[in-house]
Image (cartoon, rainbow, N blue to C red):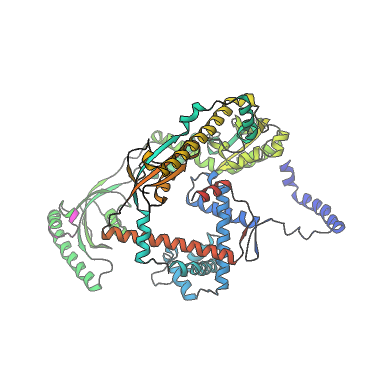
Amino acid sequence: MFESIRKHSKIVMIFLFLLIIPSFVLVGIDSNYFSEKSPVVARVDGDNIKQTDWDNAHRMETDRIRAQSPTVDPKLLDSPSARYATLERLVRDRVLAAAAQKMHLVTSDARLARSLQEIPAIAGLKRADGTLDAEAYRTLVAGQGLTPAGFEANVRRDISINQVMGGVMSSAFGTDVQVKLALNALYERRDIQVARFNASDFASKVAPTDADLETYYKAHPAQFQQLEQAAVEYVVLDLDSVRATISLSEDDLRTYYKENVARMTAKEERRASHILVNAAKDAPAADREKAKARAAELLAQVRKAPASFAEVAKKSSDDKGSAVVGGDLNFFARGAMVKPFEDAAFALKKGEISDVVESDFGFHIIQLTDIKTPRQPSFEELRPSMEAELKQQQAQRKFAEVAESFTNGVYEQADSLQPVAEKLKLKVQTATGVTRTAAPGAKGPLANAKFLEALFASDSVQNKRNTEAVEVGPSQMAAGRVTTYTPARTLPLDEVRARVRTLYVAEKSAELARKEGEAKLAAWKATPASATGLSAATEVSREQTQNLPRPVIDAALRAPADALPGWAGVDLGAAGYVVVKVNRVVPRQAPDAQRAQQERQQYEQWLTTAEGLAYYELLKQRFKVQIKAPRPETVAQGTAEN
């Protein structure tokens, strides 16, 4: 079908043109036809950020991360929290850009030039005369999809945006009193005792009735939901499957051997000794000429008596590492030495002595002492590796063609994966209990969010049709179909009675533990001498928690210390309750000068970050920032915990 359309594409285009134009004449063109409506996800200073802006920004961010880290898990990049982080960065950029505009912050040409020169990739494009290689510069920025003018506009904007926050963050400082108060509180230690009321110790006191279990079951239906599930079939097209279909002829391998045997043979190695006269590349010209003249004298000496090379090297070489062994550098291949030295060494015959060779280290005199020529491997020795290489190369070239056939095949015969599997020699794989989100430990397509989304699309679920071909990795595509679908449901009480009982007992046990702990806390506050069951006294701090839960440490360090002993109660939820007794505050030992300086620098970094965040929040209010997209639960929980 598609081949026929391709052959008669011009006729099809004319036919469609004749169909479409009259409809525009009769009905008219909606103003939104050429400007697709996109929902607003955020607003900054009256300007909208649309869903398309968000999608484009996230795609660019994802592409950047994948380019830097090709092995990164795609699920992490496509998660709701990752997408929301992109939106927050987009909002931040818009806020700072608006602030820069309102503050009339501009970047001069001179400032732009300095910033460009500070970019290593651009600094490396300078010619010997100090001018910039304009063609190489255009190629460099074109790799980012930009023209030089567009790239420089981005740099100007970034400099202006950095000035917005730079003025605040560069001016943050703390007085000695502030630093001392903050760090003393941070590193404070306290001598405490604790009494634990573990929820598990109260489980035996909970005796639920059938009515209790039914009430709990009805009050917590979400805890007994079974997610929608599907049994699926799927096929995977990757380089391995394409490579498995490739057959190589003997002629192909023989030709490949002739063309690549030199590359697949070990490199020739040479052994040399040298005498070095040091002269740094940035040394004054007069000093380098003096060193060169000294090298020429030594060259004349060893050429007159070649057998004395080792002795002369021991006495006169500035390379102290090799001088002790007569200048011997052992065997080395191409690429191991600096270029001038390598070129000279590989141009010599065994026993020959070079002229004076100049490098960044100074001036060398080289004597070639040995040559190790590797044996050329035979055709049969290289056959396995050549077959693997050649099949891999052909698979890479063939993959695009096979991928198109795969894509068309799963679409054209949408009620089964078997035809495309047979045509391309793929294996139809099966899985049960598949859900919309990847199960822990899932691999391959079943760990890919886009593939799972395609599987649970309405057409796939309702009509049991093949999904489209989905790219699930580099040179890896998959298509699947749902064979059996089970919608989400609340499991009957009889099926989950044991679980209901466990959850009910855990909840009531935690309640009993909390009530007991609160009662003891009140009694011990009133009469400290009556406190029993407390642990042995121990010193705790934020750095030394003594394996106590973080909420217990926080409560111990926050408890008022003006009247000791101090008391605090900590609800650990399902784990139970803890009563903390604070016996005394342990004075902090004064740090040495180096540690004190490090701590002060750390404090100033924290203060700078805090003031930067506070200023950004002020800017958000000033520019009336609204983020309309809902915050994912994982992000919200992380924010709350912090």
Q: Is 340 in front, or is 373?
A: 340
Report the magenta residues as a range. Answer: 315-321
Q: Is 319 included in the stretch rendered in magenta?
A: yes
Q: Position of residue 506 (x, y in %)?
A: 52, 32
- The quadrant of the image that shows the N terminus is top right
Residue 98 x, y percent position in the rendering: 58, 68
How many discs mark residues in the rendered view? 0
- Name the residue located 82 percent from the left edge and 54 percent from the top edge: 20
Determine which quarter of the picture holds residue 606: bottom left
Asked if residue 16 lies left or right of residue 466, the reply is right
Residue 231 visible within the image: no
* Rendered location of residue 328, percent (x, y): 19, 51
Report the residue at 32% width, 40% height from top: 375
**What residue appears at the point 19 percent right and 64 percent down from the top-left corner?**
295
Q: Residue at x 31, y 46 (%)?
A: 268
**Residue 86 appears anywhere in the view:** yes
Residue 384 location in percent, x, y? 43, 34
44 to the left or right of 516: right
Where 443 sits versus 128, above or below? above
Query: Which residue is farthest right?
Result: 26
Is residue 628 positioned above or below 74 on the image? below
Q: Is residue 571 magenta?
A: no
56 and 130: which one is in front?
A: 56
Left or right, 193 with reference to 169: left
